[in-house]
Image (tube, rainbow, N blue to C red):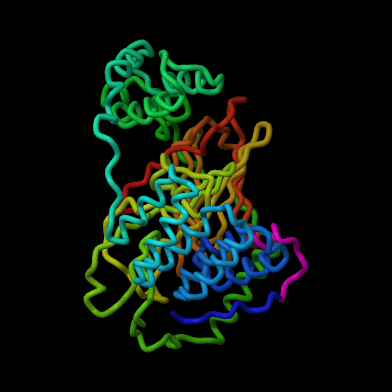
Amino acid sequence: SASVAAKPYSGNPMSAEESFTLGNEEFVNQNWGKALEHFTRAAELDPSKAEYLLHKAAALTKMGSLDQAVAVCHDAMKAEPSNPKPYLRKGMALVQKGDLSAARGALEEGQKMDPSSKQFSTWLAKCGDALPPAPAGQAGRHDGALGEMLEAHGGQVYPMLDTVLEYLKRNSDFFDRNSALAVDMIHDLSKKYADSPAVAAASPSPGGCAGGGGEGGLVAMPVTVSASAKSALEKAIKQREEQGDGEGGDGKVKPGTQCKNNSCTKCYQDESSLEQECLYHPGAPVFHEGYKYWSCCKKKKTTDFSEFLSFTGCTRGTCVFTDDPTKKKKALCRYDFFQQGPQVTLSIYAKKVHPEQCEFKISATRLKIFICFDFVNTFALDLALAGRVRPGECKVEILGPKVEIVLKKGDGSAWTELGNSLMEEDE
């Protein structure tokens, strides 16, 4: 695989954790080179932390420098000998390289350290030898109890889940079963009843009222543009004019180029690769309160960054290996939110935003935005909010590194999530 040298860090002095955070931001924006630079800096400042090295290996893998990624995994193993994650990351890189025998060895070694991890099973299956299936008769064994529980809670799934979780928090047995079985019951319950028409009709809509995001008309929010955001956009426009058009490459795809669809790990080999099917995430990555997940499948969450990267895509499509630099395209923007007192603040990480081409609208229960940034990228979000807001007191501020939207709550309730998407799959 190609060898990549991380550029020397030339920014202001910062801690390992700060460098690591910047690396994560660049990574989710698919700026692999910049991410590598920050992860390398973090690992240099604190070489004892395997997490920094593993993220560096992930960036190298994305750039096609698989041998270097494997070498960094070895450094992570030395830093934390009892940590199974370096073996997982090494196995993932070797699978992409095509060295399935070596990949299997690394994955099996890591699995010994963490036998319960499903990630090792998933990647071992890609090596050609799938692990034996789970014992039959496990799924659905709680159907009778689930039916009674659902009926006792008026057909509403979420109140019933709250009851189950309260038992788990007290480390008590649930219906004379241990906590592990209670977790299985939650899984079975979600799978069998979450999409049930009867449950959907009985369950409260987002915001706690019927109608979800359809109540009231959408109104435009006031927008403020910071001086730093204006300066960054003006500078980018000037650079773009100086560079001119037509400076792209020869249009050919180099063998080994990874598919640009999110979470697809397939690489270009020849023209037949342009027709191969891939699984990808059309949504945006979301990091909130320690959890990492994709906006297109919010039920699958993790606190582990490596596991987040390995989440299988939820949408079928065709591999894409090139970008059209002149065509506006939907882009992935990392976004997160936090709440403090009567306010919820949503941060969308997009640079060089074009204010006149953006749209920010709000109603009491719905948020709809469209952002144009970096000349050709667009990002859209249409949400039925998790709680009611006061539209007249909501505002938008476009900053240098992000767009910040402040929502004023309509009541004092706490939000456990931002809301549910109202966008169609092809939007």
The residue that appears at 62% across and 72% down in the rendered structure is 37
Question: In terms of depth relative to the viewer, which is nearer, 131 or 350?
Answer: 131
Which span is picked out in magenta?
10-21
Q: Quick check: 296 above or below 70?
A: above
**Which image quadrant for residue 106?**
bottom left
Question: In terms of depth relative to the viewer, which is nearer, 20 or 103?
Answer: 103
**Which image quadrant for residue 265?**
bottom left
The residue that appears at 45% across and 20% down in the rendered structure is 164
List the single residue furthest toward the top: 152
Q: Position of residue 298 (x, y in %)?
A: 43, 42
Q: Is 254 placed left or right of 60 in the picture? A: left
Q: Is 211 placed left or right of 7 in the picture? A: left
Q: Position of residue 240 (x, y in %)?
A: 54, 80
**Which image quadrant for residue 109?**
bottom left
Q: Position of residue 270 (x, y in %)?
A: 26, 80
Q: Quadrant of the N terminus?
A: bottom left
The residue that appears at 44% across and 30% down in the rendered structure is 206
Asked whether residue 352 appears in the rendered view, the answer is no
- In magenta stretch: residue 19: yes
The residue that appears at 66% across and 32% down in the rendered structure is 342
The number of numbered discs placed on residues in the rendered structure image is 0
Asked whether residue 219 appears in the rendered view, the answer is yes
Q: Quick check: 66 above or below 25?
A: below
Q: Position of residue 379 (x, y in %)?
A: 46, 57
List the single residue furthest toward the right: 13
- In magenta stretch: residue 327: no
Q: Quick check: 348 above or below 13?
A: above
